[in-house]
Structure formats: C-alpha cells, structure tokens
Image: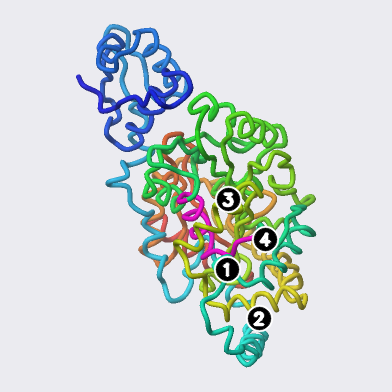
Amino acid sequence: MTTPITLDRTITGPLHLQIATRLRAAIAAGVLAPGARLPSARSLADQLGVARGTVDAGYAVLIGEGVVVPRGSAGTIVSPELAARAAPPAQRRMPFAMRRAEHATAPLPFRMGLPALDAFPRKLWTSLTIRAARGMGADALAYPDPAGLRALREAIAGYLGVARGIQCTPDQVLVTAGFQGALALVARVLLRPGDAVWVEDPGYHLARQALEAAGATLVPVRVDREGMRVAAGVTAAPRARLAVVTPTHQSPLGVALSLPRRLALLAWAAEARAWVLEDDYDSEFRYTGHPLPALKSLDRGGRVLYAGSFSKVLFPALRLGYLVVPDELGEAFARAGRLWSFGLPSLEQRVVAAFMAEGHFARHLRRMRSLYAARRGALAAALTAVFGDRVSLELEAGGMHLLARFPGAPDDGTLARRAAAAGLAPVALSSLVLAHDSGQGLLLGFTNVPEGEADALVRRLADALAA
C-alpha cells in the first residue's frame, strides 16, 4: 500500500513528528478513512527514505492520541471511532441548522453567535449615523485608510487597555471585516501553503475552513476542561507556524484556558518562533466570577495577535472587527493592507468610533450583560423543567450559548435535524469536531430568547426532538 504523504526535508524538527502530522492531516482530510490499514513501518520507511524506527516513532505518536490503533499481526489501522466524528473536508458541510439559519432574515430561536437584536439601541444608532454623515467632508469621500479610521483605532486601543488589560497603541490596531477578515489577513501575512496550524478540537468551523482554503495543514488539538491541551499540540506539531485559540470562552465548549496552559502556550510560541492568534469573540459577557484577562495581556515576547469583533457586541451586519499586531509585524501587516484592501467603509467606522468615545458602548455592554444573564437563567430553568433528568446542562461562566446533553437520546446530528425541521436552530456539538470526540449535545444560543418565551420555545424543542 502506498500512503499519500511526502516529507519536506527543508522543515526543521524530527522527521517522526512530520510523519505523524502528515498522516493526521490525511486522516482528517478523509484520504485515509476510518478502519483503513496503514502500511507497515518497513514499507512506509522505504517509501519515504527514512529509517524504520522513525516511522515507528511517528506511529507511536498517533497511537497515543487514539488516531490509529495497533492490531498486532493485522497491522495498524485508522481508528474506526473516527467515523462518527467528522466527514472529510470535500464532503464536510456546514452543520444543518447553521446552513438553514446562516442567511435567515430573522434570527431563528436558539441560533448561536447573534447578539440580542431586539435590544439594540436602534434610535440612538440612527441619530449617530445621521450626525456622522452630515459631518463628512470631501476628504472623507476619498479612499479610506487601509488600517482603519484613526479615531476608531484610538477608541479600540483605549477600550482594550481598560477592559482587557492590553497595552497597545492605535498604530498596532487594524480595523478588519470582522474576525474572518482578521484571520484572512493573518493567513496572507504569516502562512505559506502546507504550514502547520494548531486548531482547537472541537472548534469554530468557519475559522477551520478559512485556514484550509489558505492551504494550511490543520493540526486538531483536543480541548478539555482546562482548554486546549497545549502539550498535545507540542507533541503533534512542535514547529507549527500558528495556533488559533479562543482562550477566554472556548468555542464551542465554553471553557477557559487555564493559566498554566496559557503560560505553556506562550512559552511554546517563544521557543518555536511561532504565532498565536487569540480570538476574543465574546469575552465581554461573563456572568460569574471576575473577568479573565486576555492572553495578549500576558504576552511578553510579542508572539500574540489579538482579534476582536463588533459582530457579537453590536450587530453582525456592521462587518467590523479589529486586529492588534505586535510591533515586529506592523510593517508587514500595513503592506498587506495596502496590497489587498482599500479599507472599509468610513461611515460605519465613524459611527462606531462615536458610539465608543461618547460612552454608549460601555453602557450597552452593561445592559446586555444583565439581559443575557437573565435570558440564560430563564432558558436553563425551562430546559430543566421540561426535560427533567433527560437533560444535562453545562453552564460555563460566560458566553452567548449553553450546551445541553441528552443522555440516551439519538445522536445529536439527528436531534439538530429534527429541531431545524421545526424552525429551531441549535447546533450539534459533534458537527464541530475534527478528530477528538467531545460527546453528544446541542448548542443553544440564548441571547435572542426573551425570558417570557423560553418555556414555550423549550416545549417546542421537546416536541421536535421527540418527533
């Protein structure tokens, strides 16, 4: 059997880890299917031109991760348990409820990632927009600064210093087209085709797809109660170019990256000269305990790029986010902005800058934090009342969704499809997994579930799941 991998001998680092990384990528891509037999260590060593012991060591890494299983005289096979975890990228589709809800004109109940659109101060926003439009001179009609409106960058830098403990200058801040715009910019500047990138598993599906489209080799790193298993990432791909993490509120499990693992991640990045992209997508919404500092606030080596978005705290139609880059990368990102972007519409940037500078942003966050805490509590109470001991809820300290597990129920993909048929939009946890099983469950957004409607919506969900 010929295995469809090759080695790049220009890459520094042990060859056995490169073999493990390439095989893991081939399995994740579906080239090697669950249950497929791997070639013997001797034949793969001959194919790659390495010692048999090098292949044995690579196989040992994958065996330790549970990706492959030794069968004695029958050889080594791809773990059959992976069959239920993920489809190959060529066949992998957006979770059904996400596809249905992605472009819905009104938010479907339980949809994730949307702020409370019914509670947004539209009247105030309209007033600020009119004022900003009237104040635009002829110069504001020219091409905008690719880095973003200076006033907005100053407001973002000030906010991050106070709220997230990140000391940065406006020159380090780039205004982007949401998080996806920030990720695309990072990929263009920092990645070459084939570069290894750590991604959380389970994790944010659109980030993974964007990285795959950029030609990166994804390295799925398991997430547990303390967040990403940094040591597993180091074992799998010690010379990865980038790690993409959600340390404050992991997407989708909601756990926080523990302090020891934060320090280990920063130490790895410094030693490997790698980069870390911190996606701080909804850290503003925490309901118990003290707010967690950003990973960037601990970064003394200048290895962390920090991305934030206004989609979760204001509204996603803005398509505005921001990226804070280390000084070392400032010129490279400025050049990329000039080459690949003529900037973003200035009117929206002016409105957001005014919204922040005049104190509306801080007041809006306080109101939403209180509202979301109440809506989360109402949804959790309704789920417990309707399902009883048939549901197990995982309520983390913050975020905009909760995880409901239904022991003994059909697989979560089936449950999500039943809910979608009833006009509801939960997401199956298993649909966000690449290689490491995180169990079954439904992810339920609560931000657009008013307290008075929670009971009726949960009963509707129960009827759908029982169909």
Q: Determine if the magenta segment contains residue 357.
A: no
Q: Nearer the viewer, mark 4 or mark 1?
A: 4
> What residue is pinned by disc 2?
121
Badge 2 amino acid = Pro
Is residue 254 at least partly visible in the picture?
Answer: no
* Observer able to see residue 77: yes
Question: Can you give x and y, in whole percent of width and height, for residue 101 in the image?
Answer: 41, 66
Q: Is residue 253 left or right of residue 21?
A: right
Residue 176 highlighted magenta (yes or no): yes
**The residue tagged with tag 2: helix, strand or loop?**
loop
The tag on residue 171 is 4
How far apart are the two marked residues, 2 and 1, measured between alpha carbons? 18 Å
* Mark toward the start of the polypeptide (3 vs 4): 4
**Foreground label between 3 and 4:** 4
How far is mark 2 from mark 4, CA to CA? Answer: 30 Å
Number of other residues with Cα within 10 Å of mark 1, as a class: few under 14, some 14 to 19, many 20 or more: many
Residue 239: x %, y % from top left: 51, 29
Residue topped by disc 1: 449
User: Horizontally, is 17 left or right of 378 in the view?
Assistant: left
